[in-house]
Image (cartoon, rainbow, N blue to C red):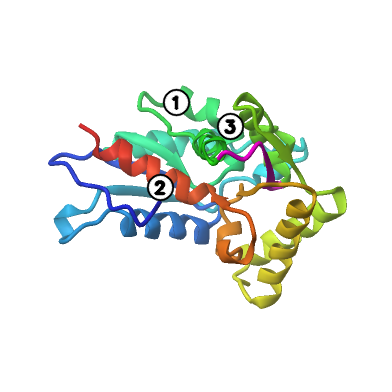
Amino acid sequence: RLSERAAIVSEPKTIGVIGGMGPAATLDLFAKLIGATGAERDQDHLRILIDNNPRVPNRNEAIAGVGPSPGPHLAAAARGLQQAGADFLVIACNTAHAFQADIEAGVTIPLLSMIDTTADEAAASGADRVGVLAADGCRGAGLYGRALAQRGVEALFLSEAQQAEFMRLIFRVKAGDVGDAVCRGMESLAQSLYARGAKAIVAACTEVPLVLSADALAVPVINSTDALVSRAIAYATRN
């Protein structure tokens, strides 16, 4: 999908990115927005405002009830981006969508949901059963379980022990480790969902695409970052 170059209109909308969760995933989103635009000169690119704030409280801990809510921080970022000129918002983190209501309450511009966008793509793939690689908070909040069920798609999740391993791998990625061991570990977890009958794998954490290659699996990988990039560019450039 990212290979399909978007035509830039004369006055495209400005994208506001709530980022920093984590910074590498935010950088990946930014790079893919640039790469998918199809610009031939600087002036053809989209205007993108990014609040890369790694001080946002841990989303997983907040959803588990053992940490402060990131809602006020996310809402403040949204307000700042709107004031700076953003016409709409995206979040470079799946789990942070559990606090979407806090964000929307603080602004008057729309927020494009990574969850809905990715679930739409999963449904469009024709897969009636997908494996979901999601962080603890994203799972605990039921974000993908609900979104996929609403579209008639069954979600398969990792076992408790596998989920613990998944979180260890995610935090290694956040620490900058994208080496072979982490890549093989993530691939093994994805393969386990395929073995249970998943007809596609949803990379439902923005760190996953940094270490999981779509070429490594026998089924499609639905990348939440790619899905959001495609929708954001379409929204920014439509008349």
132 drawn magenta: yes
Q: Is residue 186 above or below residue 78?
A: below
Is 157 or 75 nearer to us in this picture? 157
Q: In the figure, 163 relative to 123: above or below?
A: below
Q: Which residue: 59% across, 57% down?
A: 207
The quarter holding residue 12 reads top left
Question: Does residue 45 belong to the magenta stretch?
Answer: no
Seen from this angle, which residue lies furthest right?
161
Mark nearer the N terminus (3 vs 2)? 3
Q: Indicate left or right for 22 with 8 as reference.
A: right
Residue 225 image position (x, y, % from top left): 49, 50
Residue 228 higher or lower than 37, as above or below: above
Return the residue at label 3. Answer: 99
Q: CA distance from mark 3 to mark 2?
A: 20 Å
According to the picture, the residue beneath numbered tag 2 turns out to be 229
Mark toward the start of the polypeptide (1 vs 3): 3
Residues rendered magenta in the picture? 126-135
Name the residue type under label 2.
Val
Residue appearing at x 50%, y 53% in the figure: 20
Nearer the observer, disc 3 or disc 2? 2
Residue identified by numbered label 1: 106
- Of label 1 and label 2, which has the lower sequence position? 1
- On the rendered structure, is 115 left or right of 13? right
Residue 89 x %, y %:
39, 37
Q: Amino acid at mark 3?
A: Phe
Q: Which mark is residue 171?
A: none
Q: What residue type is disc 1 on?
A: Gly
Q: Residue furthest bottom?
A: 180
The kind of secondary structure element at disc 1 is: loop
Q: Nearer the viewer, residue 216 or 134?
A: 216
Q: Position of residue 76 (x, y in %)?
A: 46, 36
Instruction: Calculate the distance from the C-alpha at mark 1 to the C-alpha at mark 2.
Output: 23 Å
